[in-house]
Image: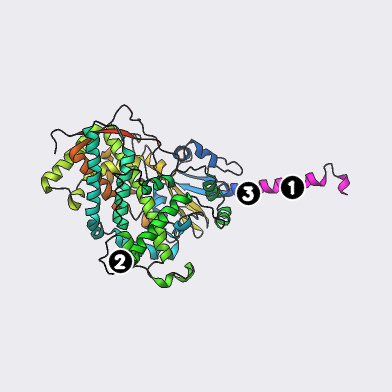
Amino acid sequence: MLELLPFSPTWVLVGLCALFLYMYLVWPFSTFKKLGIPGPKPVPLFGHYLEYGKGINIFDQECYQKYNKIYGIFEGRQPILMIGDLDIVKAITVKGINTFTNHRDMPGQGEGKHALFFSKDETWKRLRIAMSPAFSSGKLKQLTVHIERCAEGFVSNLAEDAEHGKVFDVKELCGAFSMDVISSTAFGVEIDSLHNPDHPFVTNAKAIFDISLFNIAFFIMFAFPQLGKFLERFGMTVLPKKPMKFFSEAVDSVMDMRKSNSGDEKPVDFLQLMLKAHNEELDNKASGEVAKQAGVSIKEIKGNAVLFWVAGYDTTANTLTLTAYNLAVDQEAQDRAVQEVDAIIAKRGKLDYESVNELTYLEMCINETLRMFPASQRFDRVCKEDTEVNGLHIPEGTIVTFPVWAIHYDADIWPEPEKFKPERFSKKEKESRDPYAFLPFGAGPRNCLGMRIAMLELKFALAKALQKFRFVTCEKTEIPVRIKNTLGNQIEGEVWLKVEARSPAV
C-alpha cells in the first residue's frame, strides 16, 4: 500500500509533523476573531513579538489608534487583550478586582517570585496587609531624615559641577542618589554611592536593567510561558544571575546583622517592618496552606526585599533624571518651580516633610514627566472566570493588558502630548479629566505600593537642587531624550546637563 504513495513514507511523516506544528502555532490565532475583537495579523511562532523591534511604545500607539483602543495581539501563541478604554480600565482594576486580581505568570524570576508583585489571590492580600504599614504617612515622615541627607549629598555633587562649570551625566548622579536613598530608608545600609559612583551596589543594579526584550529568556517567558516554567527548573532566569545574587546576598547580610544585634534599638525601615511581620509557621508550608494566616515567610521577606531594592533604584533614578532634563529644556517651567521652592522656604524657613508636600507645581512637573515617560509602559491583569465588562466578553484565563504609553499619548485626552506641560496637572485640569487617563503607577488596589516614597524622594532631591541651582542644557545634551526599547523608562545613553548657581544665591 505504501508503495502506491507518490512520496516516501518518511516525507509523508515529515509533512504531517510540519502540518501539526503549524496548526499548533496558529491555533490560538482565532481567539479574538471569535470574540469579534480586531487586531493586526500575527506571524506563526512569533505572533506580534517581532513588531516590538520598532519600539513597544510605538507598536502600542499604532494599534491603539487603528483599532479604537480595544484590540487583540499575540506574544508567540499567547493571546493578549489590549484595553485602552478608560471606563473598562476602571471596571477591571477597581470594580472587578476579585475577578482580575492577579498579574500574568512570569517564570524565571528567581527569588523575586515570592515578591508582592508576582503573588496571587490570598497570598497577595496577606502580603499587601503586611507591607502597607511601611508606606504610611507616619513611617514616611520618620524616613525623611535619611532622604534629606541623601538629597544634600546630591546637591553637594551639583555644587562641585557648578564650581568647575562641568558638564555631567545627570543619569549617573540620579542613580547614585536613588541607590543611597533606597539603601538607607529600606535597609539601614549607608552606601554613599554619590561619592563612589562605581560602588558595587550601583554597578550591579545597572547590570540588572541592561536587558533587551529580544533576550531569548524574555521571549520564552512572554511567548511560551509553559516552556518557561519547564526551563525555570533548570535554572533559567530572566534577570541576570550574578547581580541578582549580589543583592540576594546583601539582603542576607543585613538580615544576619539584625539578628546578631537583637538587643539594639531597631531602625524604622522596610526590612525591619517585614522582619517584625515574620510568621515562622509560614516558612515550611505550601502557598495553598497559608491563605488565612497573617504575616510573611522568610522567603517572602527576602523576595520582596531584593525586588524592592532593585526596582526602587531604577524607576526613581530614571524619573528624577527625566524631570531634571525636562526642567533644563523648559526654563519657564523651571522658573515657576524655583519660585515655588523660594516661597515655601520663606514661609516655613526650611525644606522638611510638611513643606515638601506643599510643592504642588514641582509635583505637577514630576507627574508630567511620568506621563511622558511612564515607569511602566504597560501593566496587566488575568481574568479568573468568564465575565462581561461593559459589554465586552472576556473568557477565563485571558491576559488583559493596559497600554499606558498609548493612553498617555492620546491627543484627545492630552493635547500636544509630545510637549512638556506641567499645567496639565493643575487642580482644574485634573478635575476635568478622567483619573484613569494617568496610570504611571498602575490602577486600583494592585497599584504600586512604593509610589508615595518615590514621590517624596523626587520632590526632596529636586527642591534641594532648585534652592541653589538651575539645570541647563549644553552642547552635549541630546534633544529629544531617547528611551530604551523596554517596558520601563530606562534611558538610552547619557543625559548631559550643566547646573548654574542661582544669582542671587538662596
Q: Name the residue under label 1.
A: 16
Residue ID at (31%, 63%): 272
Closer to the camera, 184 or 200?
200
Residue 421 in the image, given as x and y percentages of width and height = 28, 36
Q: Which mark is residue 261?
A: 2
Question: How many labels, in total?
Answer: 3
Residue that carries the numbered disc 3 in the rendered image: 27
Is label 1 in contact with label 2 (beta carbons under 8 Å)?
Answer: no
Position of residue 32 measured from the top left corner of the image (x, y, whole percent) = 55, 48
- Amino acid at the residue labelled 2: Asn
Rounded to the nearest whole Å, what is the CA distance between mark 3 and mark 2? 59 Å
Q: Which of the pair 236/192 is nearer the observer?
A: 192
- The amino acid beneath tag 3 is Trp
Q: How far apart are marks 1 and 2 (CA)?
A: 67 Å
Quick one: label 1 or label 2, which is nearer the N terminus?
A: 1
- Whether residue 226 is visible, yes or no, is yes
Kindly check if marks 3 and 2 are in contact, taking CB atoms under 8 A apart as contact: no
Observer-nearest of 430 and 175 = 175
Q: Is the C terminus in the top left, top right, bottom left or bottom right quadrant?
A: top left
Q: Is mark 1 on a helix, strand or loop?
A: helix
Is residue 41 located in the magenta-colored stretch of the structure? Answer: no
Packing grade of label 3 (10 A; few <14, some 14-19, many >=20) is few
| Residue range highlighted in magenta | 1-26
- Mark 1 → mark 3, Cα distance in angstroms: 16 Å
- Splitting the image into 4 quarters, where does residue 466 fall? top left
Picture residue at 60% right of the left edge, 49% below the top: 28
Q: Main secondary structure of the magenta part?
A: helix
Front of the two marks 1 and 2: 2
The colour mode here is rainbow
| Residue 84 visible in image | no
Q: Earlier in the sequence, mark 1 or mark 3?
A: 1
